[in-house]
Structures are given as C-alpha cells and as structure tokens.
Amino acid sequence: MRFLRRFLTRAANFTARRRGDQRLREEMEEHLALQTAENLRAGMPPAEARRQAVLRFGAVEAIREEYHDEQSLPLIANLLQDAHYALRVLAKSPGFAAVAILTMALGIGATTAIFSVVDATLLHPLSYPQPEQLVRIEDDLPGVGARDVGMSVPEWKDLQRSGIFEYVSPLGGGSVNLTGSSQPARIVFLTVAPNYLALLGVKPELGRWFDPADQTPGFTLEVVISDGLWKGAFGGDPHILGRSLRLDNDLYRVIGVMPAGFHDPGRTPQQRNTELWAAAGFADAPAPTPLRNARFLPEGVARLKPGLTIAAAQSHLDALVASLQKQFPDDYPPQSAWAVRLVPLKESVVGNVRQSLMLLLGAVGLVLLIGCVNVANLLLARASARGREMAVRQALGAARKRLVRQLLTESLLLSLLGGMAGLAILFSTRGFLLQLVPESLPLLNDISINWTVMLFALAASVVAGAIFGLAPTLQTGRLDLTHMLKLQGRGSKGPAEQTHTRRLLVVTEFALSVVLMIAAGLLLHSFWDLYKVRPGFNSQHVMAVQLWLPVPNDPKTDIYGSSAQEAPFLRELLSRGRSLPGVKEVALGSNASIPLDHDRNLSPLILEGRDMQSRQPPVVERSDVSPDYFHVLEIPLLRGRLFSDLDNEKGPQVAVINEAMARTYWPNGDPLGKRLRVNPAKPSWITVVGVIADARTESLAEASVPQIYLDVYQTTARDLVVFLRGQLDTGAIPGEVRAQVQSVNPELPVFGARTLDDALSASLSERRFSMEMVALFALTALLLAGLGIYGTISYVVSERTREIGIRLALGAQTGEILGMVLRQGLALAIGGAAVGLVGALIASRLMAGLLYGVRPTDPLTFVGVTLVLTAVALAACYIPARRAMRVDPLVALRYE
Amino acid sequence: MLPVGNQNGDAMKQRTDVRQGTLALMVLRTLDVLGPLHAYGIARRIEQISGDVLAVNQGTLYPVLLKLEQEGAIASEWGASENNRRARFYRLTRAGHKLLQTETREWEQTAAIIARFFDVKAEDLP
C-alpha cells in the first residue's frame, strides 16, 4: 500500500511537472537560519556561525538532486529526454529514418500478420466453456493397421456409463437435401446425440438446444440450424422456431438457431461449416441394429468429468478397454489390438496445419531478423558519422551508460515507430490479406488483430530494436576517445572494428537468406513436382455436378430404395446429360469417384476363400461408377474388361479394380474372375472383371491407393455425380443440369458444380499458399541481403578511395581494382552461404513432412540457391566496384 | 586550530553510517515523542539522542521526510517557528503511527535475535 501510494504521488508529480523547489528552498533557508542562530548562541562569530551551519547541512546540490529524484520518477524523465532528443536526431536525417522505419514496418507487420493467424489457430483455446475438457474419441485397430475406425453403439453406451465423461456424443456427418425453404438446397449437416450442444456448452441464439436426456432411439425430428442457414435459406424468418422443414423428405422441426460466430469444431473444412444439427439415438431405423462390432458411428466427441485431466481419463479408459476385451473376446480379437485414444478437441481441429504455420512464422521471423540486420548496418554507418559527437559528449563527462542508453532509446524509438507503422499497414490491409488465406484453414473466422496480437507486435518491436540497437551500441561502449577525436577530425578511415562488425552483419544476413531461400526452393520444388505429376486421368474439359437422392427415415417412402428403382432415373439422367449443348460424353459416379475430393468412402473387403484371420476385414476405397466413367476420365484398362450395358441391375455383380489393389491382394495371381464382398451383411459375391491403371484420384501426393469400382446400376448410391466432357460453357452447365434434373424430380437439389481442373488446383491450395508465402519472404530476404551487401561494399569503397587512388597512381589496372572489390563482396557472400547451408540443412529436416518428391537435402535446390545468392551479391557489388574503377587518382589524393 | 577545508570528509568515516531506513525510523519515533516539529528540530533531536555518534548531513533528512510524506506516514504544513518565522511542521499521521509500531516490533525482534547470537558461547552449544 505504502509503496503504491508513494509511486502514485510520484507519478502524479511527474505528470504535473510539479517541483517542490520553492518549498525546499524555503525550508532550507529556515533550517540554516535556525542552525546559525544556535551557533551564535554557542558564541561563534556571525560569519563562522553561518559557515558551520552550511557545512553541517551538507552538499546542497546533491540533496536537491536526491529530493527531486524522490519527488518524481527520474528514470522516466531521463527516458523522455532521450526520446525527445532521439526524435530530433531522426528528424534531422529523414532519409535514414524513412528507410529504417519502413524496413521495420514491413518486418514487424508481416511477422504480426502471421502471428495473428497462429494466435487464432494454435494459441487460442476453442471458444467453448472449459475447452480443455473437450476431447475427440478415436478408435484404432493397430493390429490390422487401421486408425480411427469409428465406434459402435454398444461401445458408445459403455463410454457414457464409464464415469469418465460428462457427455459423449457420436457424430455422423454428411450432406442432406433441404426442402421446405425457398429452393431445394444441399446443406451440410451433422447427426449428433441429443447431448451434443450441452456437451459443447454453447447456447443457441434463439430457441433451445436438444434435451440431453432425450432417449428417442431414432431421429428426434428436432433440428438446430446455423445463423447462416437461417438468414440464407429462411431469409431470417422471425418465426423460425417451430417451423417445419424437410430433410430428404422427412419432416423436422426447428427448435433453435445457433449464434452467428458459432462453428462446429470439425476436423474437415466441410464439417466446420455445418449448417444444421439433427439429434438421434442411433439405435433405431435408419441406423442398423446396434451390434458391438458394427462400427458405424464414424466419429465421437466427449466432455470429460470436471477435474479430470486427459492423461487421467486415458488411463481409466485403457482399463475399461481391457475389461471389455475380456468380456467380449469374439468382438475384440487380440490380433486387432483395439484401443481407444483421447485427442484434445483443439488438436483434432488444428493439428494438421501446425507444421505449415510454424514454418511460416519461422520464415517471417527470419525476414524480420534480416531487416534488423539491415537497420543495424545503417545505424553503424551513422554511428561512424556520429562518432565525433559521441566522443565529444563523453569527453565532456557524459557517463558511458548514459550514452548507451541514449543510443538504445534511439533504436527502440525507430523500431517502435516501425512497429506502429507496420500495425497500421496491417490494419488497413487486413481485408485483403484475409482473402489470401486458404478457406480450408481452421478457425479462419477467429483471426483478428486483438490485444495479444498488439502485445506481440510491441514485443517484436522492442526485441527488434534491442537487436539492431546493440551492434552500434557495443561499438560506442568500446570507444577510444583520443583515437576517435583525432580520426574523425580528419574524416578518414573509421576504426577497423566497425568494418568488421559490418562484414559480420552482412554474413549473417546472407546466412539467414540462404536458409529462407532453400526452404522456399524445396517447397517450390515439391509444389512443382506435384503440379507436373501425371495424375493418371485427364482433367481437361471435364465438369462434375453433384446431386443427392434422398434417404427417408422410413424405408417404405423411399422411391430409390433398390437398384431396380434407381436405375431408370440414372438412365434418364445420362440421356438428358448427353443432350446438353457441347457435351460429348457423360458418366455417373458416387461422390467418392470425384478425383481429388476430400470425400473418402472406405468399404470393408472380404475375399472369397481367404481366411481373413480376424473379424476385422481390411478396407478399400470404393466408388460406384457408370461404364463410361473410365472413358470420360481417360483412365486406361490394363487387363480384362470394363463395365458394359449388360452389367445392370439384373445381371450378376461385377467390379473393376485398380492395379494397386491387384498388387496388394493378389501379388502373385490373376485377380480376374476372383470373387469378393464389400458388405459383410450382404451374402452375394462380386466378380472382378477388369484391372485399370493407377490414377492419383485420392491425392496428387499418393501414387497408388488400392481402389475398387462397382457398377452404379448394381448399387444404390445416393450421392451422385454427373461427369460431363466436351467444349462446355462452365457458367451455364450447372443451371442446365439443374433444369434437367428438376424436370425429372423437382425436389432434387443440384450443387457442387466444378471443373476437374479447378478441383486439381484446389487440392493444392494449402501447399500453394505456404509455398507462395515462403517464396515471398525469401525474395524479400534476398532483396534485403542484396541491399546490405551493396551498402557495405559501397562503404568500404568510399573508405578506401584514397588507397585506390594511390594504387591507380602507382599503375594498377582498373580490372584489378574491379576484381579486388568484387572479391571482397564475394568473400562475404560465400562466408554467409556456408553458414546458411548448415542452417538450411537443419531447417529442411524440420520441414520434411511438408515436402513431396524432393529430399530435404535436394542438391539441385542447395546448389541453385547458392548460385543465385552469389549472383545477387556480385551484382550488388558491381555498382560500387565500377565506382572504384573510375576513381580519379588526382582527385582522390587532392581531396584528402 | 581553525578547521580548513571540508572537515566532514574524515569525520564521516569515523562515524557510523546511517542507512535511510534507520533514519526514517528515527524520524517517526522523534515525531511520536515530541509531536509536530520542523525539519531542523528533528535533525537536532536525532543528533542529541544519538550523542553525535550518528552525525548525518542534516540536509539528507529532506529526501527522507519527502519519502515518508509521499508514503502517507507523515503530513506537513506551514506554521510559525519559535522565533516567529515561517517553517514547515511535520506530524505523524495515523498510518505513520501504525508504521512506527510495526517497524519498532520488527526492529526489536531483529535486535533480540542478534543479541542472542552474541550471547551464545561455544560451551553452550550441544
């Protein structure tokens, strides 16, 4: 309390610039008068009495100083004085100030921009109450090499009863046809347990959430919708609560609208854009019979009991898993090694962008560092010009500490001004910058310039200022007064030390640039390889348009329930598709057949006559396609045959597989004629009739993923895609397809139209983003390093003008002078490159996970970058070298 | 012999150095005993009581007084001195009373502990 009070009084005095000078003087006067009077009484002569009184009082000036320090805040007063002086000094050299502040503004602005993304995604907890208690539940079967296989209804019930969790909710996602709003629409929805919103702890903006205790076995027929859907499809209808809507023809009632900023904590961008939540008990139609080994609940999230850490919960869970395995040995064969993993929900949302973001932050940090080195270089040049000023001030008695403090104040002022300018730039361009961020980035909407980000910018400015302020300061610390005064008087060569420091700075700059350039080079190389990779299918002139055949909860109302019911619609769709303008070929497929889409459709695989060793069959990517699919995408047939018109709903079931699948499951035999099943519940066998070449339809980075294709006429795929090849008018096609589809069935939404070229390019968007950003940073670094070496070599040349003049006068050839200067620059560049290559080796190993097709030690990139940097260094040195060549010996000598 | 130059120099070294904290405690105690007093009075009183063993530059008192005042332990106002001149009088505030009590207690405890250390002889130790 006392200290606080004292501090506040001092601060108040400081701000009011109140000085108790008058009071102190009066008190001292009185004091001396009293003491003098007493001395007189003791018999001293008057003059001596006064003198003794003064002696007894002590050093008046020191006491006044101490008194004022006590009264106010001397540290801040000095700081302000320094800052004031620094401002005047900077204003006197506006060119220098502008360059330094701009460099810092760019460095700090860019670093802060990347940090704001890191802050929103990696540092911030999810915006739900007690986010640390939210976990994702992932079931693994490490014994058969399967991860995240989902859980079954009995397992879910076990978890809920276990006492470890407050709530557990399975998630089943997808998209669904919404009718009953203005247009039939395809929306992203999530099937959850009735406790889901209570689990997240987010209250709807309007209405209520589901009753967490609801025990309805099937769908509760109540839905909560997103703010976006409410405002979009329902035009912000104020009477939305209680309104009915149809999802795949089933009637549901809206009971709540989520707040505007709410996003589902999903793993995929699609799930994070969920527009509707429907609650279900997962125990009745349309869900299958809840068997223990039927893992049809694809995902699960849970909230831990209060006070339980994830580690503690995991150990309880391991015990539960062990006891279940004992209790149901048939369902959990030991070789599959069933295990349940708890992943922090936050981690499951942002885990896969961590590496890219850290790479970006590291890259931009290096740019900032290089900027600091550049400004340090500028400051050094100024320090040599101001060496005399410093020497004079020191000679006049300024404490060295005080001088250093003043220089640091100057550099801090520079970097703070730079930081402010950077923030201002960031603030005014934030809308534009946000557009550059790929939309798939999780928590994109949370990115903002908040207090943490501002604080970061401040910290970055202070650290940067300290870093570049340090170099010239150290120099001043070592100042040799007489030497400086003498030297600077003649304006000749500065101390050798300074040139050393400058060279060291340039070497540092080059080393940092090499690291950045190599990182960028490797990413570019990876991207280029992926871009140039032959995907194995032809994406040109192909468009994909999606539609969905509804699955009502009651099978009796399902008009597409069997392949016999669905086939006529498919044929109609194909023939109408062919009639569209410009279309040459048409094919149909299920969602999974869209190349490079995120949708995966894994089917269990049971091979005839094979002992699968366990009841956990392997899984394989499955697509349902029409016979023309392979023609449209130009995927070549290797063996056997493709589907024909005879493989229809009446014929025996057949399959086409890709080479990777043939290699995996029949490594030594012929897969043709072999039989398999993809649904454990269906006893009929499917015959393999053909093998096609591998195509990178899952991901451009994966050369061969086992795939099986079934004939779409023999299955009941509801997620349909129309592929159209020809000279298409991409703007008109979606509308034309919609018109054709809706003239057959007006309730069907048509959506997701895109060209395959776009899909191809979209699948690279995240890589492209980080590649472009790092490349941008690397270019900036290169530019700064070039400027740095240019500045230093120019300085060295101007320092040595006299020497060069003498050399020329003594008969040196201009070519030799040129070579001499270039050699000097080259030595710096090579020194920097050597250090940088070591750093790059470390950095590239750290980013190995982001690379494709290149090794972290890719010699082409390493050599190429070194050459480019050397070329830039030579070019930057060439200008001062030319100047050196043109030195007129007469002028140079006379000038001195 | 007449004193020449700064006699404080050598004299200071012989006398015990007084730390600011101790000086503050002395100021508080003086005001506690004698009531409101001007700075000169306080200085003289401290000199008298310490028997000139603690000779401080009287001026050093002023920063200490200011510090105590800014902490709220003492308050000051203008008044008339004994020879009817304007002088600033300092008095203890309620907070100052409390501060004096706690400081005194702490000081006594410290002194007692130190005293016990000096009393202990080698043969007393087990």
Image (spheres, coloured by chain):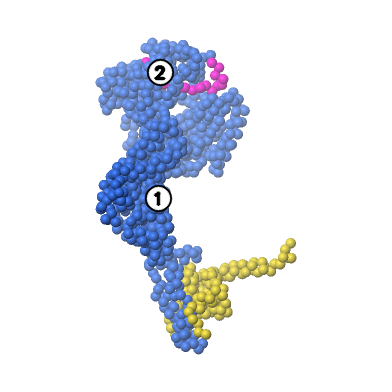
| Chain ID of residue with mark 1 | A
Q: Is residue A811 visible?
A: yes
User: Which residue, given by chain and number where applicable, does mark 1 sit on?
Assistant: A500
Q: Secondary structure at mark 1?
A: helix
Chain letter for mark 2, please: A
Palette colour of chain A: blue
The image shows residue A115, relative to residue A89, as above or below, that is above
Toward which corner of the image does residue A616 lie, by quadrant?
A: top right
Which is nearer the eye, A737 or A591? A591
Report the amino acid beneath label 1. His
Which circle's residue, 2 or 1, is located before the other in the chain?
1
Q: Which residue is mark 2?
A: A693
Identify which residue, A552 or A825, lies in the foreground. A825
Q: Is residue A554 left or right of residue A885?
A: right
Q: Which chain is yellow?
A: B
- The kind of residue tagged 2 is Ala
